[in-house]
Amino acid sequence: MEEYHPGDEVSFSPDEASNVVKECIEGIIGGVDYSQNKVNQWTASIVEHSLTQLVKQGKPFKYIVNCAVMQKSGAGLHTANSCYWDTTTDGSCTVRWENRTMYCVVSVFAVAIVL
Amino acid sequence: MDDSHSVEETAFVVDEVSSIVKESIEGAIGANFYQQNRVNVWTSNVVEQCLSQLSKLGKPFKYIVTCIIMQKNGAGLQSASSCFWDNTTDGREHHYSTSTETVWLGDHCLSNLGVKPVHSVSQ
């Protein structure tokens, strides 16, 4: 794991986090169809893998990763989030992914650890 | 300010958060049926109302509130969440019936994250 050194620039990169998350999603549900008895394992794996990869970057952030997987059946789904934090240091990104049978929405929130 | 006084003011009260969330949901959605052209307004209102009431508590926390609204038509929905934070100061409350989650993050950090704190955030 990379070490953080005080004095390093602290900034959340939404693009970098998005790429990390996309790779995790692809790796776990890339070529599969929605399956009711597997979906709980998938969401758990997606958040765990994403979190592990983010923490490995060694940046001084706390992270929250949320993932929702929904079967494609015509139902409407809407999500929203709102944050009360320090806009100069904290940030978030949301990845929307889909295949033939399901939607996956992953949100990453990164809150800077004050030094 | 002695320690016990400041612990009370900075402690997180889950019941308090829970009732704020429930009121926000009822206020925003109430007994309405799912309507595609109103759902974006509902989700925004839920999170904004929650956040506004939480910040009014005046406690030294950052907050993240997420809300998912889904139409009931038999589709499967599964969600999960994982967090990397400080277990002694941070926490979350999940309101299951409408999937609203509130996360709070304290302003103290501990060396178990591999980073040494120099001072706390002041609001």
Image: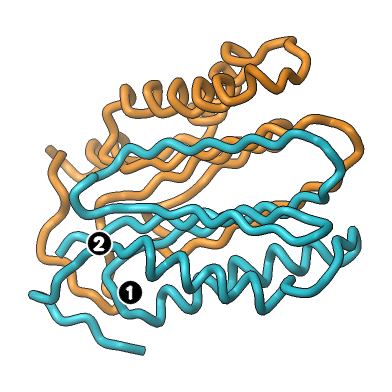
Chain colours: A cyan, B orange
Q: Which mark is residue B63?
A: none
Please report the residue visible at 45 percent of the width from the left and 20 percent of the height from the top.
Answer: B49
Residue A11 is left or right of residue A8, and the answer is right
Disc 1 on helix, strand or loop? helix
From the image, tell me which residue sits under label 1: B113
Q: Determine the chain carrying the residue at label 1.
A: B
Q: Where is the N terminus of chain B found, in terms of image quarters? A: top left
Q: Nearer the viewer, mark 2 or mark 1?
A: 2
Residue B95 visible somewhere in the drawing: no
Same-chain status of marks 2 and 1: no
Which quarter of the picture shows residue A110? bottom left
Please report the residue visible at 73 percent of the width from the left and 32 percent of the height from the top.
Answer: B97
Residue A94 visible somewhere in the drawing: yes
From the image, tell me which residue sits under label 2: A113
Residue kind at label 2, given as amino acid type: Ile
Q: Which residue is more in the foreground, B48 or A31?
A: A31
Where in the figure is residue A35, as x and y percent of width and height? 89, 62
Which quarter of the picture shows residue A84? top left
Residue sitting at the far front? A100
* Mark 2 touches mark 1? (CB < 8 Å): yes
Disc 2 on helix, strand or loop? loop
Q: Where is the C terminus of chain B found, in terms of image quarters? A: top left
Q: Determine the chain carrying the residue at label 2.
A: A
Cα separation, mark 2 vs mark 1, equals 9 Å
Residue B49 is left or right of residue A3, and the answer is right
Where in the figure is residue B80, as x and y percent of width and height? 66, 56
